[in-house]
């Protein structure tokens, strides 16, 4: 009987061992299949990235200074596999520095290969600024574009503080260091100083438009009173080149630049969805509310809520 019990135990141990072997063999097969699938997918991606294609750069929402985007766009200029770039814009604008940085990056790309802009529902202010380096700008009839201008907003909660019996004191190194301030209004010198800042940034914007659109600066200033134009109005004013969308842009690239219409097109991807949306928005808010500066972030943005 003891021998029978020992044999039974050995039999059970063998069965357990077999089950474990089967489990690990199945797991190994799954791992191998997964690895092969990963390599195959990676191979297709690599093959696509290694072949000639058009890159679509999507810019939507509020534009902020995005170093990752700037680096990725700048790299397109030296990428031999990128035959052309389609800039798809659907933005009301954003920070002046963010718009300028992206404009300059796209200008580098445009010096190396064809770039076209396709405007969506809105491509205003900084959204128009980044469109300027393109060899041709496409808009729909109803696109809202233009809004060439700069705005710097502040507020004054001094009256509310007085009613609450609160006071605020600031030790400043100079008379303009606390201009603007939420605790009191602008001084005449502060208003003059901030107006000069906005005026200088506006002048830079006007120069960008004049050079890109081959227009006289005086003419641009006539158009640059901050108003937005429809795509149809912008076409008549010389701010865009053609009414149309991406298919029209692809057709133009083929006809004028010899870029084959059957080339695949791939979106430029940056980081995670969170980084591209929530992260970018929080970054812009942090710039506007920066604790190391008493001056709000100058914005090149079209917003009907700001129309007085």
Image: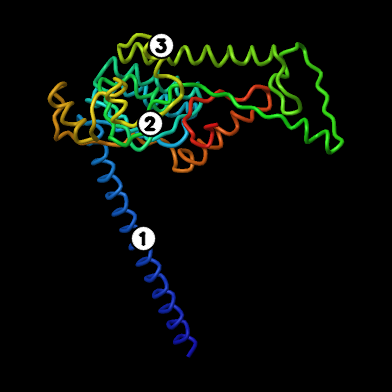
* Side of 20 where 238 appears, left or right: left
Looking at the image, which residue is at 35% across and 21% down? 106
Residue 199 spot, x, y in % from top left: 53, 13
Residue 220 spot, x, y in % from top left: 38, 14
Quadrant in which the C terminus is drawn:
top right
Crowding at dot 1, Cα within 10 Å, few <14 / some 14-19 / many 20+, comes out as: few
Q: Quadrant of residue 126?
A: top left
Residue 18 spot, x, y in % from top left: 37, 70
Looking at the image, which residue is at 32% across and 24% down? 76
For the residues marked 2 and 3, what is the alpha-carbon distance in whole angstroms?
Answer: 18 Å
- Residue identifier under label 2: 123
Q: Nearer the viewer, residue 281 or 141?
A: 141
Q: Nearer the viewer, residue 228 or 79?
A: 228
For the residues marked 1 and 2, what is the alpha-carbon distance in whole angstroms?
Answer: 52 Å
Q: Quadrant of residue 29?
A: bottom left
Q: Nearer the viewer, residue 38 or 221?
A: 221
* Side of 270 where 256 appears, left or right: left
- Where disc 2 sits, the SS reads strand
- Residue identifier under label 1: 27
- Residue identifier under label 3: 207
For the residues marked 1 and 3, what is the alpha-carbon distance in whole angstroms?
Answer: 64 Å
* Side of 76 where 50 appears, left or right: left
């Amino acid at each position: 009987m003891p021998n029978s019990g020992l044999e039974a135990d050995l039999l059970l141990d063998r069965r357990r061992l077999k089950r474990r072997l089967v489990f690990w063999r199945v797991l190994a097969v799954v791992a191998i299949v997964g690895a092969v699938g990963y390599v195959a997918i990676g191979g297709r991606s690599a093959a696509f990235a290694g072949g000639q294609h058009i890159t679509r750069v999507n810019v939507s929402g509020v534009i902020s200074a995005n170093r990752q985007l700037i680096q990725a766009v700048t790299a397109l200029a030296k990428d031999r596999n990128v035959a052309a770039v389609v800039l798809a814009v659907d933005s009301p604008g954003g920070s002046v520095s963010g718009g300028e940085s992206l404009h300059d990056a796209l200008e580098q790309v445009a010096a190396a290969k064809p770039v076209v802009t396709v405007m969506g529902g809105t491509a205003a202010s900084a959204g128009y600024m980044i469109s300027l380096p393109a060899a041709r700008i496409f808009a729909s009839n109803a696109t809202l574009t233009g809004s060439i201008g700069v705005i710097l907003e502040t507020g004054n909660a001094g009256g509310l503080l007085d009613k609450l019996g609160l006071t605020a004191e600031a030790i400043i190194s100079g008379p303009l260091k606390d201009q603007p301030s939420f605790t009191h209004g602008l001084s005449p010198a502060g208003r003059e100083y901030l107006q000069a800042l906005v005026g200088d940034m506006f002048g830079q914007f006007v120069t960008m438009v004049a050079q890109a659109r081959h227009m006289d600066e005086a003419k641009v200033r006539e158009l640059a009173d901050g108003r937005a134009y429809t795509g149809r109005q912008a076409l008549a004013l010389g701010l865009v080149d053609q009414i149309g969308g991406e298919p029209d842009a692809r057709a133009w690239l083929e006809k004028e630049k010899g870029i084959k219409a059957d080339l695949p097109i791939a979106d430029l991807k940056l980081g995670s969805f969170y980084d591209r949306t929530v992260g970018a928005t929080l970054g812009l808010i942090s710039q506007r509310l920066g604790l190391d500066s008493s001056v709000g972030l100058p914005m090149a943005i079209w917003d009907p809520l700001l129309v007085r």
